[in-house]
Image: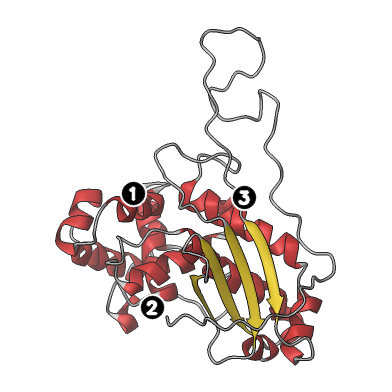
Amino acid sequence: MTADNGTDRATAASGPAAPTPTPAPPSGPSNGPQGNNPSGAGSSDRVTEPPAYPKPKLRVEIRDLNHEGADVFLGAVNLSAVMQQAVGNVQHLLYGRNAWYADPATHIPPTRSVTLVLRDMDGVAYTTGSELDNDHKEIHFSLRYIAGIKPRKERATAEIAGVLTHELVHCYQWDGRGTCPGGLVEGIADWVRLRCALSPPHWKREPAAIGRWDGGYQHTAYFLDYLERRFGDGTVRRINEKLRLDHYDGKTFWPGLLGHSVEKLWEDYVDAVKNERPEASSVSASEMS
């Protein structure tokens, strides 16, 4: 999307208490990464821990504190907790060996900071590089959209967390050096949102209505979830990592990764949904653990 390089800024603010952020890494041997042996100093066969996830600097700019959307936002979420939790979930699902440490087979982009900009604008939200460089990201979130969330009391907290999670994926995912289809980019972001149990009530599997694997957003997210179930945990992580290594070429990308063309995979997915096979069933919140 087109970047907004406006320079007007407002005072940052945060809201009342809300979810607990991702916990700090454990220090004991029973909770560390598999194969770690922190006890027994001098052991010659100790396995070195992979690095913990990098923690970006998180900032917020509210450009109109008098806007109704700002009041809704600050009343619905504890921003620090929600942002930290969302960053942790994104890193875990796209790069995780476990909840605290990265998978050595993956490479996290060098995102150094994320600035959330709340302002009055059309649409919902978008992510762009900042004026500094592409390692500093900006998420622009519409105050107008936030003000229009209904039913507000029941949906505001989850919807805000869901949109922030989706946009934070864009701060951390690879895109085939700019060649990845937009539908896949957006589908991966909504797959993370789906796996975090933050899908809105209107989402549903509807391959027959969409007819394309790269329909984007939740349509592609459910297709990716099917692939994750069919080919095993970490499949979407492998897709993301391949988009770091290579330019996207649909004729070779999917057969090289999963052994089939994307058209055949989509055909299998449609059949699985129609016949209600287990690999096309809904995800549950427990799958985030």
Residue with the mark numbered 2: 206
| Label placed on residue 231 | 1
Which-is-in-front pick, marks 3 and 2? 3
| Label placed on residue 282 | none
- 114 lies left or right of 226: right
Mark 2 vs mark 1, CA separation in Å: 21 Å
Q: Which residue reaches farthest right?
A: 16
- Please say if 238 is above or below 195: above
Whether residues under marks 1 and 3 lie with C-beta atoms below 8 angstroms apart, the answer is no
**How many residues crowd around disc 2 within 10 Å: few (fewer than 14), some, or many (20 or more)?**
some
- 28 lies left or right of 45: right
- Sequence-earlier tag: 3 or 2: 3
- Sequence-earlier tag: 2 or 1: 2
Whether residues under marks 2 and 1 lie with C-beta atoms below 8 angstroms apart, the answer is no
Q: Position of residue 131 (x, y in %)?
A: 52, 71
Res 268 → quadrant: bottom left
| Label placed on residue 55 | 3
Q: 93 or 38, which lies in front?
A: 38
- Sequence-earlier tag: 1 or 3: 3
- Please say if 156 is above or below 173: below
- 247 lies left or right of 101: left
User: Which residue is at 71% across, 74% downward?
Assistant: 157
Identify the amino acid type marked 2.
Glu
**How many residues crowd around disc 1 within 10 Å: few (fewer than 14), some, or many (20 or more)?**
few
Task: Count numbered badges in the picture.
Answer: 3
Q: State the SS at label 1.
A: helix
Q: Position of residue 102 (x, y in %)?
A: 51, 41
Identify the amino acid type marked 3.
Lys
Q: State the SS at label 3.
A: loop
Q: 6 or 67, which lies in front?
A: 6
